[in-house]
Each structure stands twice: as structure tokens, then as C-alpha cells.
Image: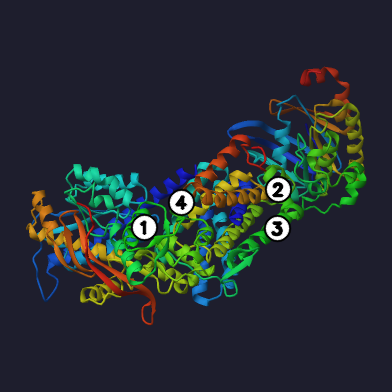
Amino acid sequence: MARSEPATPDRLAVDRLTAGYGASVAVRQVTLRVGPGEAVALLGRNGAGKSTTLMAIAGALRPMAGSVQIDGQAVAGLPSYRVARSGVSLVPQGRRIFATLSVRENLTLASGSGNLAEIYSLFPALGVRSAAAGSALSGGEQQMLAIGRALMARPRLLLLDEPSEGLAPQVVRVLGDLIARLRHKMGLAILIAEQNLALAFEVADRIYVMERGEVVHEAPASAFRDDHALQKRYLGV
Amino acid sequence: MFLLAAGLSIIFGLMNVLNLAHGSFYMVGAYIAYSVVVATKSFWLALVVAPVLLAVVGAALELVFFRRVYGRGHLAQVLLTFGFTLVFVDLIRSQFGPTTRSIPPPSGLEGAVQVLGATFSAYSLFVLAVATVVGALLLVGWRSLRVGAVLRAGVEDKEMAGLLGINLPRVFTLTFAFGAGLAGLAGVIAAPEFAIYPGMDANVLILALVVVVLGGLGSIEGALLGAALVGLGYVIGTSLFPQFAIGLIFALMAAVLVVRPSGLLGRRM
Amino acid sequence: MADEIQGYLDRKLVENLDRREFLQMGLTVAGAAAFVACGGSPTSGPSGPTGPEFKLGVVLPYSGVYAELGNSITNGMRMYFDSVGNQAGNRKITMITADEQVQLADAVAATKKVVEQDGVDMVAGYVSSPNAAGNRNYLDGQKIPTLVANAGVNSLSRAAKSPFIYRTSFSNWQPAHPVGTYVAEKLGKKRIQLVYAKYGAGLESVASFKETFTAAGGTIVGPDVATPFPNNGDQTPFVQAIQIDKIDGIYSFMSGTDAVTFLKKAYELGTLTRLALVSGAGFFVEQDVLAAITDAAPAGAITGLHWALTLPNKENQDFISKYSKKFSGRQADVFAVQGFDTARVIVEALNGVKGNTDNKDAFMKAIAGVSFKSPRGDFKFDANTNNVVQTIYIRKTVKDPKLGWTNQVIDQYPGVADPGK
């Protein structure tokens, strides 16, 4: 798969990344890239290694081998707070809102340069409930808060881990619109791990498919959307 | 008591480190107070010097030693911090000998005061006042300041806090230093009220652990409530059955643990 | 869990100290022996002892609340043994220390260690009464000659007396007994409230005081103020339980840290100055307490004890100055005197039997017969109780221009013997 070297470095370039928990390897030799302003989806069944890949990129998990570069800068092995400060924000699986902190505290926690008014204008619901405890929000609101919290750091790369999980279908559609808007408005590069294909196809330009910890397929999102045989083979849908 | 428990609770809750050396910081604080008072006759100087010195000691210990055992479970931590209690007691013993020492209350706070018909020593009231003020400040800081939010976030989900760009290692070091400083402050405050001797650390450490367990880990409110309960229990206990005051407190702790295993205001573990 | 931790801490602490203390001691003795063996002194060249080594098991607390007492007693013993070249009856004397700690279980372990592992010829020590009483049956059963160097529990001179156990320190009855008489008769104070740490020694002391005090027409005003022992909490409620307006004074038994915190609180609350009389067993205002509380000291307190820093006799003045010189300026205390006398009893008894301790009855008889002029005055044993017979001094707490806060001897009751049969 020959590809000419881009003039500017990729926003994210992952090369032969291997990572796992303790001694067990969860992802092996993963290579992928996300260009500036590009949105890429990571597809795969449960346990395929999507979350592990995102956690390893964000530095929450120390890679065992391979490299991770953000705008050409190596970040593999750095503690998560340093990776975060180099422009990567993760919206983790299950949102992981700080339940005992208020909405406002959740947002201002990160030492980013984002401003609260901007987030509140993006998510009016959060503005209304800014004093409420994180635990008092609905699932959809919590997802908004998790995204808003990630945006407060003014990231260059947004990692989204199963954002549609546990949300009602109409909320997922709103979410899709929102992600698309963010991308265009803020020029964000996005890497989204998803099982909800509709959302993935709505958001992403390109897709990678993971299986048993390895990347097994790469394609433009449109091509994969139309290839039902491949979808069935890799994802069982 | 509250000061000590607050430090212990934050350290335990946030860092998940069971710091048995906390009582030692208290003892060292009292001895620093003693040394400063003997050398300069100024209790107020001691009140500044001891917490600062202990914060530095705490930070240094965290950077060099404790940092390495975070991931290793409580046993390694208990052994390490236990080792430090031994080192501190030996250091104190070799420097000051096993003799009981004592310092007078600062001038202006000697003697007794009548409050609502009861007589208290002025210094006891001062201790109460300091504990109240520090407690209130901690509570305000914990609830309203960004530092408080960062700490609470750290207690709740360390990994997520790191993902948000919070420099947890630095927060840990500062927290540890702050906790040690609080213990040192408690030591200075306690010095004129109680006797100063090697071994004073073990007595308070046990009570502080009870306070923390009672109130719940990783919560300033819990430490406050726990300290109040232990204090009340001790006073009521000593006046009703002098020989069982400590037993009463432990019974209280056992009862709380049965009903609410994570402590009165603790998060679920 | 807290208890386990505490227990572990204590044990750990002790292992370390024990080893160190032991080493130190070994070095001292070895040094002395080497000195003697080389005949290094130009003025005298005593030849070393040729008999078998005499091993003395010293069971004293070197950690925990009584560590200070253990150290003082050990220093006193070392001082006397050094003064006779660490030998007697042609036998070299070696001290083998073991940490008594605080709890009985540890004291039992320490005793068994020196007896069974080190095979000592004799045991000396025991600061705390429960520990002395708790080891009594074992020592008696094993027929180990034993000197109790502090623990005051009365029963050791009475029901639990053993032909193998003698006491060089005091029975709790002794220092308190003359105080009751003195307070009621000489001072004419007839209404006294009892204030004490509620444990064996405190109870025995106040009972002894009550005996002579009520016999002399005094009245005990209740309720008693009994503090937990040890009291790590606030002393305020106990100080306030003293019924100043209804009494002529208090009789108190407390020592060490408890005495320090109680007296300080009583001083701060103004109770001390309003009390016409503070009396007690001497430990309440011994030098360790006075050094800690300084000007919160109860001036004029009347206490009974078998020694005082200010005793003018030559033996005492000698002892105090040599002790201070030997142990880098440390002030002698009553415990050091007890250790010093304990060592002397051992040396004189060994000389008396010419080093032959195989005949235990003869050795014990030699111990019983030892008498001498101690820093505390005339020292001898009572054949009825195996306890020391000694002068009890009535002392008054004063601020001495040279010594600072101390106790001045104002009266004495010679030859006070425990009433055991």
C-alpha cells in the first residue's frame, strides 16, 4: 500500500503500537494515521482492542512497543497529562464524569485555555445545570459534559470512545450532528471508536477495522458503507 | 485530632497510600516546637517553622520513596511507612532521649477562662479555635477552590484526571507535603497541651485512623465528622467509664463499619 | 487492625533496640575485660577472674512508655558493675539485656529468652508490676535467683512471695504509708480527696495512704478522681473533678507522662494554686516530671519516697556526681539508684559465696544477708517479705537556686518495712 509522504506530518501517526494490561497483550502492531481535520472511525467487535488503542494513544496505558506521534512529536511513553497537554483529549468509554463534582467543576478541571461560555453555547443544557452534580445529569447530558470537558483543553485531536453507548437513537443522531459540526467549526481531527455503524459513517471519512487486537482492514468510509459482505465478515452485521 | 485525620484522609483517599508515618510527622512537629521554643522562646515561630519544615520533609519522602510504592498494594506501603515510623522514633530518641518533655502555652494563653460558668484552660480554647478555623478553611478550599476540585477528582478517578491534563505526580507530592504540614501543625498545637515523648505518635495515629475509618476515606467532611464523634465519644467515655474510653471508641467504629462499611461520608469502595 | 499495627511496631522497635543495646553492652563489658586482661593500668594490675562467667539476665523496658525507667536502671547497674571491674567472687559479670516492653506477653518472652536461650545464672529487672507478678511463677518454678528492681506490687512481698525473688526497690505500700500519718498528724490536714491513675500501683498506693490517714483521724472526701491509665486524652475533666472547696488537699498517685499532663492542666486551670495541699507518692513530682513541667510544678507538694535528689548523705552526693559524669550530664533519678543498689546486692552476694552459685539456697541466703549504706540510706532485706527495708523521706517540692525544681527532704521515717508476713 504505497502512499506518498505528506508535506505536513499527520495529526496522529501510530506505528506498530503494541499495548496491553500487565503481561497480557491487548493490541498488537497497530498502525494507523489521522490527518489534520480528518475524521477516522475505528470499527470492530467488543474486545477487538479499540479502547485499548485509544487509551494507549492518550497515555493512560504505557505502550509496550511502537510509536505514537502527534504532529510529528513522539508522545509514546509520556504520562497521560503530558500527552493531554500536547493537544490530545479523550472522551472515554462510559464518559467517566466526576460524579461528586458540579458540571462547572468538571469543565474547569482541566488546565486548558477553553472558555466556559463557548462550551455553554455549544451545549446550552450544561449552562442551565452548571451547578448540578455530575451524577444528577441524564445519560445524554453526561455525554455532552464529557465532550465539553474534552473540548475545554482546546485539543487538536479528539479521541471518542463509544460515544453512542447507552444513548437513545434520537440522541445518537444529535450527537452525530454535533461531532460533524465540531469538526468543521474547530478544525478538529477526530478518531472515534464505535460499534454504531450509522454514527461512524455519518462522522468519518475513513475507517479502520480491528479484530483480535490487530488492524485488519482500512478503507474510505463510503466504500466500506456500501460493502455489506465485508461488514458481515468483520463485524457480523 | 481533626487536623491529623484530615491529612491522613486526603493522602489515603487521593493517593490510596496508607501512610503510617503520619503520626511521626505529628511527633516530629511537636519536637520541632519544643526545640524552637527552647531556642527562641517563641511558640508562634514554631507554629510557622514546623509545618513548613514537615511539608518539605513530606515532599522529599514522597519524591524519593513513597512514589515508588503507589502501584504495589497496601502491604508494601504499610511496610515502607512503618519503616519510617521506626526511623523517626529512633531519630527522636537519639536526639532527645526517651524523657517526657513539655512546653508552656504561649504567653497570653496561660491560665484559665470562664465560659458559661465552666472553667477551661485558655490554651484548650485556643486549640479549639485553631481546629475550627483550619477546618473551616479546609472545607471551603475543598468545596469551592479549583485545588479542591482537582483533589476530589483525583480521589474519584485518578486515570481520568490524568487524561484531562492534570499533573498527578505533582499533585501527589503537594498533597503529601500538605498532609505532612497539617500533621506538623497538629504536633505544634498539641505540644503545650499534651506531653512530648517518643511514642506519642502511635497513640494519635491509632485515633486518627479511627477518625478516618469512621468518617470515610477521601473526604474532608468525613474527617471532620469522624473527629467530632471520636472526641465526643472519648469525653463521654472517660466520664462514664474511664477505663473503657478507648474501647467505646472502637466499639463505635465497629458499629459504623457494620452499618456503613465505607464510613459515614465515605465513597463506596 | 490498629492493635496489630501497634503490636508490630512495638515488637519491631524492640528487636532493633534490643540488638543495639545488647551490642553496646557487650562492647562495654568486653572493653572493661580487655582493659583488665591487659593490665593496662599503670597503677594497678589486677588479674582477671578465672571462674566461669556469671550471666545476669536484665529484663527491663527499653521501648514503650517505660523506656526511660529501663534506661535509668540499666545505667545504675552498669555504673556499679564498672566500679568493681565487672567481676565478683572470681567471676566475670556479663549483663544480657532483654526488652520487657509494656505487655506481659512480651515480658514473659524476654524472661524465657534469657533463661532458656542465654542460660543466665540470675535475673534482675521488671519495671511494671503485672510483668513482675506474671513472671513470678516461672522464675519461682525454675528456681532462678531474681531481683525485682522496680515493680512495686504488694503481693510480691506477701501472698506471692518466693524464696528466689527479692525486691530492691519498694512495695507500693511503702512510700505512701508514712504520708498518711504525716498529712493527718504533722500537717493537720484532715479532709483529703484521692486522685490516681486507675491501675494496680495507683490503687495500692492510695489504699496504703488511706490506712494511716484515716487511722490518724483523717477523712477521705469522695468521689475519687480515677484517671484512665495511661491517659492520652484531655485531663481537664479529671482536674475539674477535684472538689477544691470541700477539701484540705489531695493525695495523688501518678507518674511520668500522666503526671506531666495532669499537673500542667491543674496549673493552667488555677486548681494548683487554690489547693492548700498537694500530697502524693514521690513519683508524682519526681525529677523527670519536674524537668518537663518546670514552672507549672506544684510548689510545696508533700510526697513520700525512698530517695530524693537532695539527700545530703555522702553516698548520695557521690552517686549523683559520678552518674552525671559517666552518662554525659544526665541527672540521677530514683530508678538509677535502684539499679545501682541491685547491682551491689549481686556483687556482694557473689563475693559472699565466693562465686559459687550452684548451691542456690546458699546464694539466696547471701542475698538476704546483704546490707549496706546506699545513696538512699540504710539498705537491708526483710526476712519476712524478701523486700527492702528502707527510710521513707517526706519531701517538699521547691525551686532550688542551683538544682531548679526539686524535692527537699523535710522529715523521714526510717526502717519502713512492708507489713507482709
Q: Quadrant of residue B159?
A: top right
**Disc 1 to disc 4, C-alpha distance:** 42 Å
How is the model colour-coded? rainbow
- Circle number at residue B152: 2
Helix, strand or loop at mark 2: helix
CA neighbours of label 4 inside 10 A, class few (<14), some (14 to 19), many (20+): some
Do the residues at pointers 2 and 1 share their chain?
A: no
Q: Which residue is mark 1?
A: C206
Nearer-N-terminus badge (3/4): 4
Above or below — where is C148 with respect to B214? below
Nearer to the camera, A17 or C360: C360
Q: Where's residue C37, x and y in %?
A: 12, 64
Q: Is residue A51 left or right of residue C86?
A: right
- Circle number at residue B83: 4
Q: Amino acid at mark 4?
A: Gly
Helix, strand or loop at mark 1: helix
Nearer-N-terminus badge (2/3): 3
**Disc 3 to disc 4, C-alpha distance:** 34 Å
**Disc 2 to disc 3, C-alpha distance:** 17 Å
**Disc 2 to disc 1, C-alpha distance:** 55 Å
Q: Quadrant of residue B93?
A: bottom left
- Circle number at residue B136: 3
Name the front one of labels 2 and 1.
1
